[in-house]
Structures are given as C-alpha cells and as structure tokens.
Image: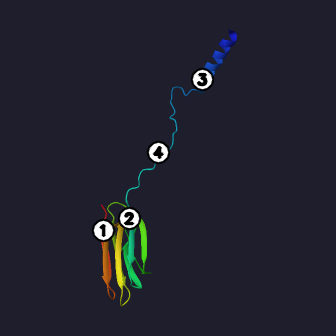
Amino acid sequence: MKKLILVAIIIVVVLLATSNSGVSTPVRTRPAAPTKVTGYDVKYAVTGTAGSVDITMSNASGGTEQFTKLLPWSTTFHAPSGAFLYISAQNTGDSGTVTAQILVDSKLIQESKSSGAYVIASVSELLP
C-alpha cells in the first residue's frame, strides 16, 4: 500500500512539474496552404513574315520597353488586376506581315494584323 501511495505521489509531482500552470499551448499542425496569387498570366506574341520588328510594350512592372527582335517572338509575365497591357510591333523592312497578340490565362484577348512596308500591328487591353 505504501508503494502504491508513493507511486501516486510521484505521478502527481511529475504532472504538476510539467504542467503550464493552466496556460494552453496551441498544437502545431500543417502550415496553411498559401493563398491564391491574384492576377493574370499574360503572354505577348508577335509573328509574321517580316524579318524583324521594333517592339514597344508595357512590361510586368507597368513600365515601357522598346527593342528590336527577329520573328517569331513572345514573352510571358504575371500582371495584377487593373494592369494596362500594350504591345506594338513595327515591320523594319519593305515587305512582310506582322501579327501582334495578347493572351491572358492562355486565351487570345486581342489580335492585330498588318502587311506591307514598315506597317505597325498594335493591341491593348485593360485587365479587370
């Protein structure tokens, strides 16, 4: 009987020593899934028979870039809601065709086609 009382006392002492004095500690579980990133996946594409084109475009940060590229050419980036999208491609030669496209989440949103010397194809879109 004395051994049973001694064991009970030891158990009570251990429980009291390891308790948090009534303060509960939250149990850690798996981290929460990341929240969905808002915005859109944007692709600008320029194709055609022109040898090269001068491109002017609004970029991922809302700025404007200008450069010359051989065709076909494309770029992709992530744009927030409310972003203004714009791409213009001018044929640098005296013949050929130029097609400029804006695709949002893999869907064609805007397209412009031009043919001839130094023609320009340009498209724009304001994201909702």
Q: Amino acid at mark 4?
A: Ala
The residues bearing labels 1 and 3 have C-alpha atoms spaced at a distance of 67 Å
The residues bearing labels 2 and 3 have C-alpha atoms spaced at a distance of 61 Å
Looking at the rendered image, the disc whose residue lies closer to the viewer, 1 or 3, is 1
**As drawn, is 110 to the left or to the right of 35?**
left
Percent across and percent down for residue 18 are 60, 27
Q: Residue at x 35, y 73 (%)?
A: 101
Q: Is residue 120 visible?
A: yes
Q: Amino acid at mark 3?
A: Leu
The residue to which callout 1 is attached is: 125
Percent across and percent down for residue 110 are 31, 70
Q: Earlier in the sequence, mark 1 or mark 3?
A: 3
Q: Amino acid at mark 2?
A: Ser
Q: Earlier in the sequence, mark 1 or mark 2?
A: 2
Q: Which secondary structure, mark 1? A: strand
The residue to which callout 3 is attached is: 15
Q: Quadrant of the C terminus?
A: bottom left
Q: Earlier in the sequence, mark 4 or mark 2?
A: 4
Percent across and percent down for residue 61 are 40, 66
- Compared with residue 60, is residue 30 higher up or lower down, i.e. above or below? above
The residue to which callout 4 is attached is: 32
